[in-house]
Structures are given as C-alpha cells and as structure tokens.
Amino acid sequence: MKNPEFAPTSRPGVFLGYFLQPGGKWTGDYLVADPDTFSKVVKPTVCRVKQLTIPRDAPFNFPLKEEYDKIRKSLGR
C-alpha cells in the first residue's frame, strides 16, 4: 500500500513480536501487522520494522482480545 507523497510515513499497526534469528538472536527488528488487512479469510500483511513509536497519550489497545476470548471459551478453557 503506497502512501500519498506528503503523508506521514508511520501508520498504526498491531505489534506481533520480535524477529529472531536462528538460536534466538534478536536482530533489532519488530514484527508488525497492518490492522486494515485483518480478516478471518486472509492472512494479515506482516512487516519487519526497525523502530516502533508508542503514543504516550493513547491507552494500549488489544484488537484481537475479543476474538481470542471467544475461541478460548469454545475450547472449554
């Protein structure tokens, strides 16, 4: 997805974890998914990024928590 020429280069994303090399060595890269691509049918677009920006004035948001709880309850846990 290409941004317009004068648009900000950062976008909101869902933090998925750390990119690790074999042996568990961290390269400094983070795995982030584009929240606009989440769907039950298609896998989300996952990007490796070097830097995360966490807004100080916004609370943490867990967009997949509701779906996680629903699946977990259906398994009887």
Image (tube, rainbow, N blue to C red):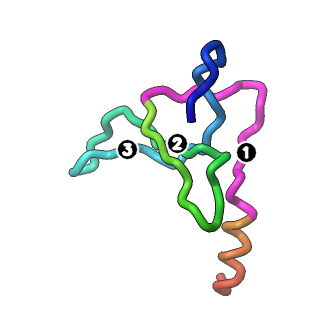
Q: Earlier in the sequence, mark 3 or mark 2?
A: 3
Residue at disc 2, secondary structure: strand
What distance separates the C-alpha of mark 2 from that of mark 1? 14 Å
Residue indicated by mark 2? 32
Residue indicated by mark 1? 61
| Image depth: mark 3 or mark 2 in front | 2
Farthest residue, direction top: 6
Dominant SS of magenta comes to loop
Farthest residue, direction left: 23
29 above or below 5?
Answer: below
Q: Which residues are magenta?
A: 50-66
Decide if residue 28 is on the left or right side of residue 24.
right
Which quadrant would the C terminus be assigned to in this image? bottom right
| Percent coordinates x, y for residue 53 in the rendering | 59, 26
Contact? badges 2 and 1 (CB < 8 Å): no
Q: Residues within 10 Å of mark 1 (few under 14, many from 20)?
A: few
The residue sitting at 28% across, 49% down in the picture is: 24
Residue indicated by mark 3? 19
77 above or below 17?
Answer: below
**Magenta includes 31?**
no
Q: Residues within 10 Å of mark 2 (few under 14, many from 20)?
A: many
The residue sitting at 71% across, 52% down in the picture is: 63
Amino acid type at image mark 3:
Phe
What distance separates the C-alpha of mark 3 from that of mark 1? 22 Å
User: Based on the displayed image, in which of its 4 quarters is residue 61 positioned?
Assistant: top right
What distance separates the C-alpha of mark 3 from that of mark 2? 10 Å
* Residue toward you, 9 or 20: 9
| Percent coordinates x, y for residue 16 in the rendering | 52, 49
Which quadrant would the N terminus be assigned to in this image? top right
